[in-house]
Amino acid sequence: VQIAVNVNGTEYTRVVEPRLLLIHFIRDELGLTGSHWGCDTSNCGACVLWLDDLPVKSCTVLAAMADGRRVLTVEGMARAGRLDPVQEGFARCHGLQCGFCTPGMMLTARWLLDHNPDPTDQEIRAAISGQICRCTGYENIVRSIRWAARYESGDQA
Amino acid sequence: MTADSEHIFNKTYGSVPRKEDARFLRGKGTFTDDVALPGMLYGAVLRSPLAHARIRSIDTLAAQAHPSVEAVITGETLAERNLAWMPTLSADVQAVLATDKVRFQGQEVAFVVARDRYAARDALELIDVEYEPLPAVVDARTALDPGAGLVRDDLDGQVDNRIFDWSAGDKAATDAVFASADVVVAQDMLYPRVHPAPLETCGAVADMDQVSGRLTIWCTTQAPHAHRTLYALITGLPEHKIRVISPDIGGGFGNKVPIYPGYLCAVIGSIITGRPVKWVEDRSENLMSTTFARDYHMHGEIAATKDGTILGLRARVLADHGAFNGAAQPTKFPAGFFHIFTGSYDLRAAYCEVTGVYTNKAPGGVAYSCSFRITEAVYLVERMVDLLARELGMDPAELRMRNLVRPEQFPYTCATGWQYDSGDYPRALRAAMDMAGYADLRREQADMRERGEYMGIGISFFTEGVGAGPRKHMDILGLGMADGADLRIFPTGKAVLAISCQTQGQGHETTFAQLVAGELGLSPDDVEVVHGDTDRTPFGLGTYGSRSTAVSGAAAVVAARKARERARIVAAAMMEVSAGDLEWVDGAWRVRGDPEKAATLAEIAMAAHSGLELPDGVEPHLDAGTVYDPPNLTFPFGAYVCVTDVDPGTGQVAVRRFIAVDDCGVRINPMIVEGQVHGGLADGVGMALMQAIAFDADGNCLGGSFMDYLMPTAVECPSWELGSTVTPSPHHPVGAKGIGESATVGSPAAVVNSVLDALAPLGVRHADMPLTPAAVWSAIQGRPIRSDLAIT
């Protein structure tokens, strides 16, 4: 099938197999390898990206389902060379180690802060509970997201 | 501590942000599956659906006829090239693709190379394998019974499923101690089979250049140099024509130490097709076929006086290594470092026996941040000490405090011969108890018990042994465990450090730059760290067993100090003074008594590259290299306290608090150290409460996806409470010890002790991990379940 997808503000038109998964479309067809694949069963969240305005696990979405829609991946998070506060928070709070889960975690965090600018730690933990990190024990991911929330509320420079 | 005490608090040490983050935050990391080469093909592995079966025939004609398929490889194809079997890291052999029998569910049977990933999978469906099913050997406890099937009939002289019998310690002395003890407590316990499950699965891209004869392999490997040697030995290709590139690694935890059949299939696929071949396993393949951890059936006995002096420890272990003995550990230690099982206690005698057996399960046996089986050892002794405390009616913290090795006993030689380098154990335990508010917690627990609520307080004290290791004791397949480091210093005073070890998230690019910068008076930004490419780095054994800082880190420091000593001679020539008149102060060689007269490394580097006349025999430039052979392991330690709440109606366990005081000697980057601890604590909670790879009676794996084999998420993990003490290693050049696995080693026992402490009023003495709601509930009912088998 032919699909037209807007990824990080750029329109891509491609002919793809109907069974092609969105994660493979993004990675293999478009070469945007920041989004990762980790489990096949929608458990790990390494493949989280935004479809229109919602984070989705792109290993469980067909590329064809993204036709006519917008996709945001980690490559599109920084604006005009400036890191998103969530990215900045992950750097400052050591919110990543191997970096494999990080893009998905940051995209979920961005969605959370867009909808709940001042989340509690429990709300942050609940928001990322569909995603697995094997390195950080989550502590510094929570701190990173909290840092971004405070930054955006003007509490810290 | 060495005389270089100024390096304990080196100016460049500290929680500086990581250099590697810049690429990961932007999605610009390069993981193996991100590598895309022109003309690249994709491989997929056909795996056995059966745990034990004879292969009657394999028909690949239909697969070969698939329009996108370039090659179909079977064991027969490999046998023609003498590649059907490969050596494991424990000097056993493992089938690359099965020729005679399949020996575990998920074993590699055939390999398809096709023009895209989906087509490769499609073609697997077209291969027709005829199997003759055989009874599976599933239960390690009956694997040595006379009627048990023979898993390894391929091995000459193998008449049963025994791999090894091994023992350590003084049996007679231990028996004597037990015979005279007031109290002896015994317990059977299982450390179930678990899997490290890094978020990135294993994979490789192999590119055989037919013209130059060079083979390049991008691969998820924690040990690129060891892999290069193995590829040379297996394939017969000359080692200097092989380049192993370990790009960014999405977590390793030991899973990426061995060579897997899929890697070799990608190599052979590239040799056959003349094109690059990528193979990346899926999650089920990762969980079902790559190296697991633990699977230790243990019987422990502890002997003590009635006033609580621990006298001795005995253990008998049945170790399930699966179908091939692929344990990645130093050659002389078939049970890894399990015999460090006396833990942190000063006791008179100890003896352990370990028997390894083959079963029809996935091969392997060490991985998962375990420090070569110290995880199992710590779990055993920490459970036994808790059981002893209960038998004696003593507080488990008090019993531990009474028996810990005392600070003045270091260096301490334990009953099985390990020499612990340094420690102050009581200080760490006190720190953890203070942070926890131990006395208050005990009061709260008593109040809750009055109300019929079940709260547990669990303690674990561990001693690790990491940084393998002295060459005279430790090698892997004959390769001594020493690491090289090459330091190049450019005329403008910038430096590149090339190291053999391989980060999987530990932040080597940052920490190693801090180490070198600290020795040379540079900024860490002035030092670039190169790793993960055998063409660009010196030989070394890789990153596992928490050995990077302990071995490669030491190598980096030694190389930097060599450069600094050469810089002293150059500086003396520059300033026309005697080298003996110079002292290294504040990042410069300064004239003693005239500190304003000084030369920084950048100034000296330029002079070293100039035409400056140097004393006879002194080489120009400042480059330096070394190979570091550690004199001993380093022995980090720690005290952990875990607080749980248990619902006796459902068996649900909630971890309320977790306090971890770690001592890993000098901390180069405390932020990174704490991150390592955080991750290990989550591992421990996962293993203690939710993880086990179980099998049914036919050998079907019941933990083949993240829906069945559970990972802790942010909601099961508490906010970790960390503390630290610093007892430098006396033999490491900056006093550092490894930290990567401490928390994984130490935490499971704390969680389990906590849950069993909570259940004490209900009469539950022991229950095996994972303490799932079902396991806890069954234990409360007095009918404990086996977590390793689901046999109906």
Image (spheres, rainbow, N blue to C red):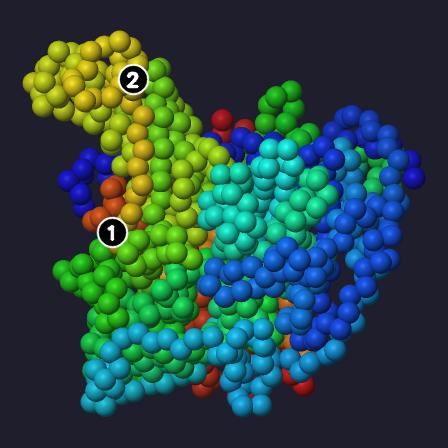
Report the disc number at residue B426: none
Q: Residue furthest right?
A: A1
In the rendered image of this protein, does residue B632 appear above or below residue A104?
below
x%, y% of residue B352? 33, 77
> Marks 1 and 2, Cα distance to the nearest angstrom?
32 Å
Residue under label 1, please give it.
B631
- Residue B633 visible, this orientation: yes
Q: Quadrant of residue B137?
A: bottom right
At a point 74% along the width and 78% down the height, the residue shown is: B132
Looking at the picture, does residue B12 appear above or below residue B272? Answer: above
Give the residue at mark 2: B605
| Left/right of residue A17 with respect to residue B77 in the rendered view | right
Kind of residue at badge 2: Ala
Count of numbered tags = 2
What residue do we see at 27% from left, 75% from top? Answer: B169
Residue B550 position, x and y percent, is 33, 47
Which residue is more in the foreground, A48 or B427?
A48
| Chain for disc number 2 | B
B580 relative position to B561: left or right:
left
Q: Nearer the viewer, residue A50 or B314?
A: B314
Which quarter of the rendered picture does the C terminus of chain B lie within? bottom right
Q: Position of residue B533 (x, y in %)?
A: 50, 37
